[in-house]
Each structure stands twice: as C-alpha cells, then as structure tokens.
Image (tube, grey):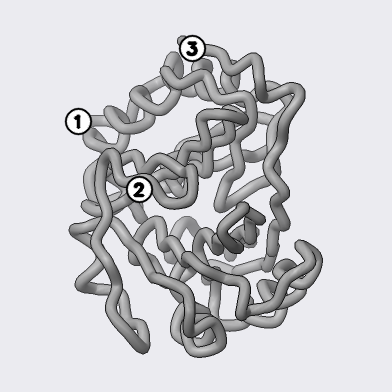
Amino acid sequence: MSEHPSAGSEQLQVQAVVRDMVIPAGVAGPEPLMIDVRCYAVAQPAGIVIIDTGMPDAEAGIAAAVQALGGSFDDVRDIVVTHSHADHTGSLFALAEKAPLAAIYAGGSDAPNIRAPHGVTPIGEGTVIQGFEVLATPGHTAGHVCLFHSPTGTLFIADAAASERGDAIRPPELFTADALRAEESLARIAELGPARVLFSHGPELEAPAQALSRLIGSTHPPA
C-alpha cells in the first residue's frame, strides 16, 4: 500500500454539495432509507472541475459551491460524471447549459446512457483531467470511474465504497451491476493508500486508507 507524504502539506480546494435522498420502503429493505448524496466542485489552475452533479435539485448548491471557490459557471471547465446513476447525473443538463465552456466526461461504457445538451466524452483508465487521473473501476456500473489526485493523495471514490458510522462500507448490492468486478475494483483502489477519500455517500473518514483496508478484509459479497 503506497502512501502520499505530500498530502499533509497540500490539499485541494474542494467544496462539497450534500443533499438527502430517500429510498422508498421495499426497494433496499422493508423500511425507507435516507442517504446523503454528495458531489464536488474543485478549484484547479485551469478552471473549476465539477465531479458528479447530484440529484435534479442540486443545481443551486453547486452554484453556491462554485461561488465559494471564488468563481462562476464561466470558470467551470470540466464536468466529470463518475457513472450513469440518476443521483450522479440529475443536475447535469442544467449545469451544462449554465457552464457552456465546460467539457463533459463519463466512463466509456456509461457515456452513451447520459443525457446532456452537448456531447459526453468517454474516458477510461489513464485519462488525465486537470491533474486528476481517471481510474476505471467497473462493477457498480460497467463504466464506473474514480478520480485520483496523486500530489495530494486525494481519491474521489464515487460509489466504489461509501462511509457510514465512521467506517467504509460497500454500496448496496441491489444497486451494483456486478458485485465481483466491484470487489476487484475496490481492492485495486484500496492499494493506493489514499490520504483523503471523498465519498459520494457519507462523510470523510479520519483514516481512509485503513478503513478501505478493513473493508477489503471483511466478508466479501456472495459469488
């Protein structure tokens, strides 16, 4: 497991946008389930990067996050959608219309299924977007990607894992297309030993690399 010593002295300028979503009773269990949905605005030298766009009601929160970074939608240069689920693409169309200078990216297998006012560029392993390395992490969806900023050891993990009660957890298998591939992807990104992990569902953890290692060591989903 690698470590990133520079992460202690350098951090990305990140603004999180957090909204609550209710999963109705009978979908993921007998009771309704409340989860948070997070997307991010990140300041980079060449412009602001938006990572995921949340639910359809996230537009105002993303605008506030961009403003908190000292910018406007004219400063947004890249919108990266980690996968095609509705809680990650919900505000994409509205944001793309407000940020016409922004390129839109999504994992290759998911890109054709994502609606936007102009083209969605497929991305995959090794693509670099403003210093973020794209990691192909299929399983949750076929085209699921994570973003890794090596200089700071920061991992935007999307739905490869979530956090709950101070630890890392797997997303519900109900919403995971291929549990075995998801497990392989999770093991791979845990090997990065990230200094900071930003989840799409759940808050940051104090020791994320250790939390991911514990998760890999826990019971795997059934074959």
Query: Residue shown at 41%/62% (left/top)?
Result: 81
Q: Is residue 18 left or right of residue 46?
A: right
Q: Is residue 86 left or right of residue 95?
A: left
Q: Secondary structure at mark 3?
A: loop
Q: Secondary structure at mark 1?
A: loop
Residue 190 in the image: x percent, y percent?
A: 44, 23
Dividing the picture into quadrants, the one containing residue 162 is top right
Q: Which mark is residue 145?
A: 2
| Amino acid type at mark 3 | Ser
Residues at marks 2 and 1, CA–CA distance in whole angstroms: 23 Å
Q: Report crowding for label 3: few under 14, some 14 to 19, many 20 or more residues within 10 A (C-alpha).
A: few
52, above or below 156, in the image? below
Quickly name the residue at label 1. 223
Q: Earlier in the sequence, mark 2 or mark 1?
A: 2
Query: Residue shown at 36%/59% (left/top)?
Result: 83
Residue 25 shows in the view: no
| Amino acid type at mark 1 | Ala
Query: Residue shown at 34%/24% (left/top)?
Result: 188
Q: Earlier in the sequence, mark 3 or mark 2?
A: 3
Q: Is residue 88 left or right of residue 152?
A: left
Q: Report crowding for label 2: few under 14, some 14 to 19, many 20 or more residues within 10 A (C-alpha).
A: many
Check the picture and name the quadrant holding the C terminus: top left
Residue nearer the viewer, 109 or 41: 41
